[in-house]
Amino acid sequence: MPTLKTKFWAEALIRRARIGGAFAYLRHHGDDDAGVVLIKVSFMDGRALVWAPERDENYRRIWVPQTEAAQSEAEADTLIARLQGYDNDLWVIEIEDPQGRNFLLDDEHKPLDRA
């Protein structure tokens, strides 16, 4: 199955977030065709959550939060900077949304355990 180029996927996520009432922008532009994307969701209260892609048992891309709970903005930025040190083609999308929505499609991510 052909995959969508990263550039188009990133633009679509930013548009979906903006249509949903959040502020979203591209913090770092990676490789147009196949760069890996990180999504930082800022809760606008000093907390943030970073989402990164992984593969499930059927080799489908899913999105997984990189910590069990939201962390400080500074900790999230440190994590992103560390990962960018390993991969210069990394894309970083930031979404500012007080509700903490990531705007991924329901079948694209593991839901957070909000119990």
Image (cartoon, helix red, strand yellow):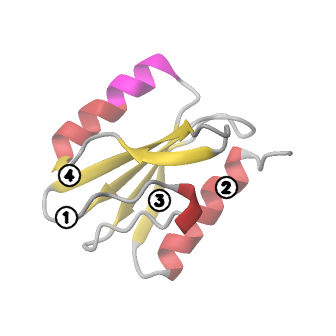
Local packing at callout 4 (Cα closer than 10 Å; few below 14, some 14-19, many 20+) is some
Residue 72 within the magenta-colored segment of the rendering? no
Q: Quadrant of the N terminus?
A: top right
Amino acid type of the residue tagged 3 in the rendering: Tyr
Q: Which residue is mark 1?
A: 115
Place residue 22 in its image quadrant: bottom left
Q: Position of residue 97 (x, y in %)?
A: 31, 70
Q: Residue furthest right?
A: 1
* Mark toward the start of the polypeptide (2 vs 3): 2
CB-based contact (under 8 Å), mark 2 and mark 1:
no
* Mark toward the start of the polypeptide (1 vs 3): 3
Local packing at callout 2 (Cα closer than 10 Å; few below 14, some 14-19, many 20+) is some
Q: Which residue is mark 2?
A: 9
* Mark toward the start of the polypeptide (4 vs 3): 3
Lateral position of residue 52 relative to residue 30, left or right: left
Local packing at callout 1 (Cα closer than 10 Å; few below 14, some 14-19, many 20+) is few
CB-based contact (under 8 Å), mark 2 and mark 3:
no
Q: Which mark is residue 70?
A: 4
Which residue is nearer to you in this view: 59 or 49? 59
- Give the main secondary structure of the magenta stretch: helix
- The residue sitting at 32% across, 58% down in the picture is 112
Q: Which residue is mark 3?
A: 25
Q: Position of residue 95 (x, y in %)?
A: 39, 61
